Image (spheres, rainbow, N blue to C red):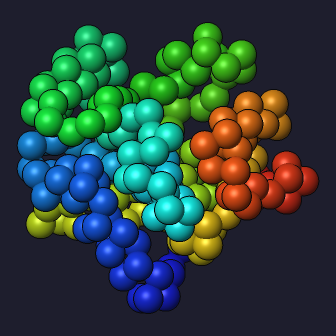
């Protein structure tokens, strides 16, 4: 989805102002994983903190690095990547979580109770993320870009809208309960207004 330039500039401005996001993107070369992106959950929560006057890391559990390597679906390789990146960014005040989106289908049913098809790309994986505002991926360094299949309007509003492409209503409500505890003024749309599968 193509966003107006002002929204894109606002997103990069948010990234540059946030101490953890800017530090990560400035050192993006250290990630060194195929088609890697910073997942949008950290970006959305950083924006909520700005809007509602909280500190930059209020309510933020971790930062998610997603990448796509269909040539190596081993858990061992993914874990090694996570340990390496966590060590390289040990100065950041949040936990680092690294996931190869090419292998999500191998563990998804055990965790969530139903199977999914393998993702075909990093953009395809991001398009299934739980909300439209978190379905965003940033890449730093010289190849700086944005993947935002639902656009940036909900993220920058800020508004939470479920992305019903893959998640269930129960999972969304569980996440929404946590968000309400940390950001009580956040606009969270009901499941009935979820983005429906295409």
For the point 12% across and 66% down, the residue is: 142
Residue 70 at least partly seen:
no
Residue 192 horizontal/vertical position (percent): 90, 53
Vertically, is 54 above or below 118? below
* Front residue of this view, candidates 17 and 190: 17
Q: In the image, 119: left or right of 13?
A: right
The quarter of the picture where the C terminus appears is: bottom right
Location of residue 159 (image quadrant): bottom right
Look at 42% across and 25% down and name the residue there.
103
Which is nearer the eye, 39 or 113?
A: 39
Question: Residue 68: x percent and y percent?
Answer: 33, 39
What residue appears at the point 52 percent right and 32 percent down from the top-left corner? 118
Q: Is residue 85 left or right of residue 129?
A: left
Front in this rendered view, residue 35 or 135: 135
Asked if residue 180 lies left or right of residue 92, the reply is: right
Q: Position of residue 145 (x, y in %)?
A: 30, 67
């Amino acid at each position: 989805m193509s966003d107006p330039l002002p929204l894109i500039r606002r997103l990069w401005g948010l990234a540059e102002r946030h101490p953890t996001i800017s530090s990560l993107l400035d050192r993006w070369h250290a990630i060194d994983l195929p088609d890697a992106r910073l997942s949008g959950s950290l970006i959305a929560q950083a924006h909520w903190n700005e809007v509602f006057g909280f500190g930059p890391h209020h309510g933020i559990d971790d930062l998610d690095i997603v990448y796509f390597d269909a040539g190596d679906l081993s858990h061992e390789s993914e874990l090694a990547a996570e340990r390496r990146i966590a060590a390289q960014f040990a100065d950041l005040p949040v936990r680092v979580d690294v996931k190869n989106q090419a292998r999500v289908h191998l563990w998804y049913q055990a965790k969530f109770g139903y199977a999914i098809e393998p993702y075909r790309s990093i953009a395809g994986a991001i398009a299934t993320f739980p909300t439209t505002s978190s379905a965003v991926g940033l890449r730093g360094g010289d190849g700086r870009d944005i993947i935002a299949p639902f656009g940036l309007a909900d993220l920058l509003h800020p508004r939470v809208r479920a992305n019903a492409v893959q998640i269930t209503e129960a999972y969304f409500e569980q996440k929404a309960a946590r968000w309400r505890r940390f950001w009580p003024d956040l606009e969270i749309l009901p499941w009935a207004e979820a983005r429906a599968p295409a």
